[in-house]
Amino acid sequence: MTESSHDENIELMTYSEIVEVKGFVGNFDVTIRKKPRYVDLSKCTGCGLCTEKCPTKVPSEWNLDMGLRKSIYKPFGQAVPNVPVIDKEHCLFFTKGRCKICQKLCPAGAVDFEQQEELVTKKFGAIIVATGFTQFDPSVYGEYGAGKFKDVITGLHLERMLDTSGPTGGHVVRPSDQREPKNIVFVQCVGSRDESKGRPYCSRICCMYTAKQAILLKDHYPETQSYIFYIDIRAAGKNYEEFVKRAQQEYGAIYIRGRVSKIYEKGDKLIVRGVDTLAGKQVEIEADLVVLATAVVPQPDAIELAKILNIPYDQYGFYSEAHPKLQPVESVTKGIFLTGSCQFPKDIPDSVATTGAASVRTCGILSKDELILDPKVAFVNSDICSGCLNCVEVCPFNAIESTVVDGKTVAQVIPTLCHGCGNCASTCRTSAANVQGFTDDQIYAQVASVFEILKKENLLELSE
Amino acid sequence: MSYLNSQDIHQFRNRILSISGEDASKCIQCGKCSAGCPISPEMDVQPNQVLRLIQINDPDALLRCSTIWICASCQTCSVRCPEEIDIAKIMDSIRKLALEAKGPLGEENVVKFDEIFLDSIRKRGRVHELELVMKYNLALRQPFKDAHLGPVMFARGKLGFLGHKIKELGKIKEIFQNSKRLLKP
Amino acid sequence: MQVGYYPGCSLESSAKEFDLSIRAIFQAMEVSLKEIPDWNCCGASPAHYLNEELAMALPYRNLVKAEEAGLDRVISPCPACYSHLKHVHEEVSKERHLAERLGTIVGKRYKGGVVSKHLLDFLKEDIGSERLKTSIKVSLNGLKVASYYGCLTRLPGVDIDDLENPILMDEIIGALGGEPLDWSHKTECCGASLSVSRTEIALRLVNAILEAAKGRGADCIAVACPLCQSNLDTRQGDIHKKYGTTYGIPILYLSQLIGLAQKLDYSQLGLDRLVITPKNLLIEKGIIEK
């Protein structure tokens, strides 16, 4: 991340969001809102004094509310740029008009409460979407008690605890009483592979990160015992199967095949009621800590962004690729590429690979002066067009716009956006819209000639 | 050794589908049903195994098992199943098939109890609990089972010696006569 | 307010106190209960696999009788009765040939005008918390109550509360001045249907429920089902013999707790019919006089 912020060919715009996208491949006009961080990027040295002295403490989103942060803060240690942002909702100055300690103490005079948001519109040839994923909220499973029982956490919570720069300084403890857990139960497929919760897919990464967490736990805390409830182990990567085997054989993790039905409290422990389908019996485990491997889901604003970018998405909110096998990093909309988990759950090697692929594809566009397109695109004969603009409504790719020709409002196809689906052609009442090579007249001619041949060879059976 | 392809592998699954409307092939054998079943410790065939045996067309064990009779129909399995299969309904369907097959039943006394129950309704229009329990105990030749509860229940006025007969008893008998079992044993 | 009433077979004998307490509290809230004339057993569990048509015809006749008597709403205190009536009503509303068939078996057509209610949703929606609160004369003084729902929320056709964490009873207990406890076995099956034929299973399940309630410090358990009450109450002696555990936890119907808060008579509420007597507990908590 640091490298990219220094590269002369990259302009890094952090704390910014896309507001509007107009145009098409090679010629996108993108409007970006640069949100005010109330700290001047050009002046701040990243010394951290403001954060140190800020009096307000707020639950830290980065640490999943397990720790606190200040109102003027960097989201995490390695954040780029090394400049804090002020949280307007909690800052004493913005909420109550007091304090301003950060401004007073800043040696570089970088704190600027007057800073305004900036709207910039720039031209881009291509867009790569890498907006990632978030976690499924497991509290919808009333039977698991997530959100109710403090010691039922998610894999990401455990990850934060294992991080030495995390909220617990790298110590894994029970959130309820800060004691070290002895028996840890991992529950796989929480939210994934579940028709009843609307997510029948597999989240791909959980089997592997759970095995990793079980290994790390045993490594840091030799007294612990991990139990992992799974349905299937998905370890289809290089060295992945061997890794899971190590967790079982060298690190003593007990893998139990069966979904968990209920988790409840008994005294200060948690009882996990599951099943071992291989042994054929119900099992109950007394746990100190329960870690749920929650499903990978798209970001909450994924669909909103899709609408701005004009790219399609599937029933789960993951962005749709142009072809599941042959075009996995291209969105259906030309010029917009997808990488990482915004398209579908991926692990790190997958994300790196698809990012490389997407980058090279954009070079493919940007290195040329002209684009070669499939000629099977639609066109509108403006002489016949009645200007009803029904075709504009039915075009799934927003590839038709209204224009004025000889004083008359007519429809016009943008060839670079058109996919040749023919929706406009079948909708058009005057037959003004057609797909090149497949006009109504051409199709009728084909049908007519087929009938001619059939008639000649007496193969035609006509009813009375 | 059973040859899975000696007959149509989908046969039993189709039978269950037509009786209950539930499709056992949706089951991915996650085991959540067995995990949450309150009666699982006493069952000879676990709920997920019941679904499995349907999937591989092996009804014999199912028709003879005790599981389908001691299922309490508490619906825990059905409401938690990720594939939204109504497992309790499938258990009920296999009961019907077990009676139809006329072979030995896994739990004879459950059927006995239920038959005496229905008989009480046929004769009175309502269930006479004391008569039900007494007849059941006699049928099972354990006349003194739960007799220790007798005095306490009596003292609390819970025994209901007389039982009630509804007025339209003829109507009830008619209903019993007209109602058809959809699966004939 | 008038509402139809379908007691069901157990409320005539082993669950008489449920019937008594419901009649008492409804009278105190000025709701008149009209019993469905000449009602018959709903068929409960046995019918549906032994004879499918019978299983639907028995509840169907009750709906017919209710409609004949001009009842547009019927309360069934027993969750199984409630589920059967509601389920049959829904099925005949969807399937015309089923409605015709059942009409033929029973000898009269049901026109579809009866809404089935359970005690809990009737109290919440039809009576409402205001009317309930006005009828209360004494507080339950922080009596620690573990609400036990059993399989009530999960029965086919029943959709009155959250499946895993129901709160209808807890809310009412809170309104009565009691302390509703959050505990692990709220919806765990008690094995009532096996209480006679496989008693040892029922004992194991009841033992687990009582142990969990006691572990949370419950003074008593509140129920809204006659089978649950009977199972949890009468089997405590057998549990002591098998497991050596003594709980002595009174199992009270929700209607009895409401009646206590309404300061109704002890035996009018059928409290003297409970096997584990709540008398000392209630005196200790200052809810009733000596």
Image (cartoon, coloured by chain):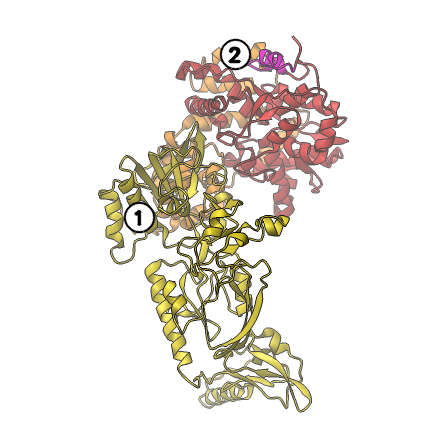
Q: Nearer the viewer, residue A373 or A422?
A: A373
Q: Identify the magenta region.
A: C271-287
User: Quarter-wise, where is residue A227 in the image?
Assistant: top left
Give the answer, above or below, for where C46 lies relative to A79: above
- Is C90 part of what is drawn in magenta? no
Q: Which residue is mark 2?
A: B150
Q: Which residue is mark 1?
A: A212
Counting from the top left corner in percent of width and height, residue A316 is at 49, 58
Subunit of mark 2? Answer: B
Residue A406 visible? The answer is yes
- From the viewer's perspective, is the residue at label 1 or at label 2 nearer? 1
Residue B157 — which label? Answer: none
How far is disc 1 from disc 2 in space, using C-alphas? Answer: 61 Å
Of the residues shown, which amino acid type is indicated by label 1?
A: Lys
Left or right of residue C160: residue A187: left
Towards the viewer: C51 or C81:
C81
Give the x, y percent position of residue C251.
56, 20
Q: Colour of chain C?
A: red
Q: Name the side, left or right, on which C229 lies relative to B138.
A: right
Place of residue B39 in the rendered image (x, y in percent of width and height, measured from the top left): 42, 31
Q: Nearer the viewer, residue A5 or A425?
A: A5
Percent coordinates x, y for residue C49 in the rendering: 50, 36
